[in-house]
Amino acid sequence: MVSADEYGRLKRRDREALRFEKLTDDDAAQIMKARVPGKYKHLDKELKG
């Protein structure tokens, strides 16, 4: 269990947008090389149209 204050803090962080410029070089490199697993290939059609 967590306090209501801690829950609120965690929920705010859940919605926090980070600017790419604020990432470390290592974090940016990890994001840039990330790939979606092949088992989700069927979802590509959702991006088209």
Image (cartoon, rainbow, N blue to C red):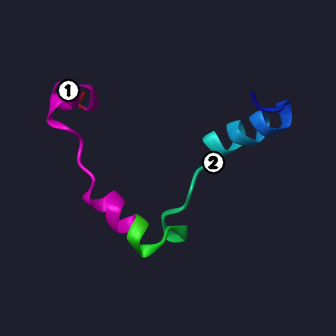
Res 4 quadrant in image: top right
Q: Which residues are magenta?
A: 28-47
Residue 7: image location, x then y, percent: 75, 34
| Residue 15 showing in the rendered view | no
Q: Are marks 1 and 2 in contact (CB under 8 Å)?
A: no
**Residue nearest the observer in this picture, 19 or 24:** 24
Tell which residue pokes out farthest to the bottom in this image. 25
Viewer-side label of 1, 2:
2
Q: Residue shown at 76%/42% (left/top)? A: 9
Q: Residue shown at 51%/70% (left/top)? A: 21
Circle 1 is placed at which residue position? Answer: 45
Residue 16 circle label = 2
Determine crowd level at label 1: few under 14, some 14-19, many 20+ residues with C-alpha closer than 10 A: few
Q: CA distance from mark 1 to mark 2?
A: 28 Å
Residue 30: say if magenta. Answer: yes
Residue 24: image location, x then y, percent: 48, 72
In the rendered image, which quarter contains the C terminus? top left
